[in-house]
Amino acid sequence: MRNLRRRRIALAGGVAIMAAVAVTAHVRLRHPSSGSPLFWSAPQSIGIVIQSAGSDDVSDGSDEAALRGAIATWNGVGGTVARLLEDTDPAQRQRTDWEQFGLNLMLFDEDDSSGYFPEGSSAVAITPVWFFSDGRIAGADVLFNGGAYTFSTSGDGFDIQDVATHELGHLLGLDHTGFVGGTMYPYVDPSVILHRSLSRDEEHALAAIYPTGGTAVISGSVQRAADGSAVAGAHVVVRDATGRASGATLTSTAGDFTIGGLAGGTYELYADPLDAPVSASNLTAGWTIHTDFESTVHGHVTVASEGSADVGVVTVGEDVAVVLGRNIDLYPLRCVSGRTSAHSVRGTGLVPGSTLTCSDPTVSLSGVSWYSNRVAFVLEVPAQAAPGHLDLTVTGEGGDEDILTACLEITPPDPEVVFVTPNQGDNGGGFPLTITGSGFRPGARVVLGGVVYEDGEPGGCTVVSDSAIELTAVGSTGGLSDVVVIDSSGVEGRLENGFEFFDVPTVQSVFPLAGYAGGGTELVLVGDHFKRRGLAVRIGGIDQGPVEWVSAEKLVVTTVGGAPSGPMTIEVQTEDGVGTIVGAFRYVPPLDPSVSAVAPGVASAGGGETITITGTGLEDVQTVVFGANLETGLGGYPAPQVMVLGAEAIEVTSPLAIAGEASVLVQSATGQSGILEAGFRFSEFVSDSGGGCHTVLVDGGRPPGPGQGACWLALILLVVLRTHRDALRRAALVGE
């Protein structure tokens, strides 16, 4: 085991030690010394920040969408108050100081800035969980090893949503699970995406840890038939009347167990050794795991909603040689409703004469072949079979049994996205879309342009039928985007480059706001997405002729004139679309004012000096501003007094200002402006008064983190395994 790493700010205090490990529902992260389960004291508002840099492997924003999809998966669990709340504040998203309390960051570490991914590291991702001696979680972060591994949203590397959903389970307080098909299963492969969705075990775990109300609870103890001794760390599982695995936990050192968060109903309960493919090495520190017993079905138990049932003692037999399942298999084994699929499972003692059964009797098993260390078979799933996880049980010739928990996952067929109407739109969003295809089910999500749309949620999408989904697009970056429909089971359909967002120009400001009706006024347009090619500017629908492209954010055009009127619409058109600003400009009869000289050309920054401005068209000038922005006319230092001397001269009092070069802007009552870009300067102001004082602020150091007491760190690592079978990189999440 890796030594626990202390936070940089030491927190003094003692650690409470308990004599016996507490009985906890489901498999939870625990304090390594006391055995106290870890928990959030305010689970209804667990803040999450997605670091803005994202993954170097993803350029279309879909990495953020995948992370938000993982957050939405946990937030979609019913019967729990636990909620992950994303903080989208840009300042927070730019932070990288993940180790600080109060910041739960999801970050792609591309250069080992965290120190957890040195060269040669086999960790794909890590979730540091900081907690106090009573089990309260102080903070947790999800870090991806972006320097060594490729992450993807389209099958070209480790699936971001798959990995993130698992890691968020640790952040919420869950340890690894013996549910082979569950999200918290300790192994993952780039070809597997079904961990995007939660098993019933994880859903019931969240309802048990952070409940909204009462739940059904089943309890008991596990003992050996030979001598009545307690079995510690036995994997106790319940499955519902349809054979779907529904919940599990590990027994305490005294052999006791409690499974909570369940719905009322009748369940079949069994105890199974946690020997393979999940074992004690996959759990965080402090567990005692016994595996010297046989998988044993105890029988059925009925429990009412918000009721409890004590099954008493579950008696297990002696250990057997047959074992079903190895961690080099790809779990869960996907079985599509209405289809037939071939599979194989590794193990030991899988010899001819053995039998293989599925916990759902409506699923047909055929073509079973035994190879000592492997069994191959064909599964046929009835059409419309309910989604969920099923068990496989092997029974040897002598009656020895072993159960592989939740290894099969029944899913619907992949959704199919055929086309999108319309298939183009501007990046400002606000337009309706219809996605046409097949296999669309309630609860689906759409990912488009890096945005996640959830069925039935405000601002989300609506599954109209199994062949149509409707949504209103929101703003996105320009370019081609895949259209992805993700089923609640985690399987997806994708139309590559199915939609194009145009980078529509946006006009944010126009300066000046009025000009001579005869034309010749130089306008500065500030905005974004101004492209060099195909540029045209129209005022009141009239093309203004040649456009000077300064940058993607700035254009300059000289007006052609028009009848006195306004306000009029200004439009900027590129090849991709039209950007509009309404009521931005007026044509007026007077000539535009101009500034030719300023005398004197220097004045004190202290203000109060008389300045003479000469030029033309100055008879209606009302405002003079020194240092205004040349692009917008905003800002600067207004002159406190303006006196018009005639059409060619005005006299002003200089304002208080900051020393340096300054433009001189004159503006008439009509909104027309003239500006002298250079030729005036404010000199340093020297006061003739004496004395004064100043304050020095002394940094007394950062305050400590919240609360008092010893703070520990649980590390959940994603470790790559390589097998002799193929070159795929397998990942094992190993608790340290």
Image: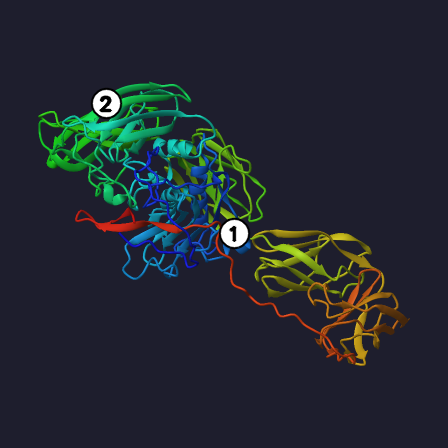
Q: Is residue 114 visible?
A: yes
Q: Relative to residue 384, is residue 74 depicted above or below?
A: below
Task: Name the residue beneath numbered marker 2.
Answer: 298
Q: Judging from the image, what secondary structure is the residue with disc 1 in?
A: loop
Q: Amino acid at mark 1?
A: Thr
Left or right position of 668 against 236? right
| Image mark for residue 327 | none
- What is the CA distance from the residue labelled 2 to the residue labelled 1? 57 Å
Which residue is depicted at the point 60% across and 67% down?
697
Q: Specify the quadrant of the image occupied by residue 353.
A: top left
Q: Which comes sooner in the sequence, label 2 or label 1?
A: 2
Q: Is residue 55 visible?
A: no
Which residue is depicted at the point 57% across and 45% down?
429
Q: Position of residue 336 (x, y in %)?
A: 30, 30
Q: Amino acid at mark 2?
A: His
Q: Specify the quadrant of the image occupied by residue 682.
A: bottom right
Task: Name the residue beneath numbered marker 1.
Answer: 477
Q: Relative to residue 347, is residue 597 depicted above or below?
A: below
Q: Specify the quadrant of the image occupied by residue 216.
A: top left
Q: Position of residue 194 (x, y in %)?
A: 33, 38
Q: Is label 2 or label 1 in front?
A: 2
**Considering depth in this image, is 524 or 406 the residue closer to the camera?**
406
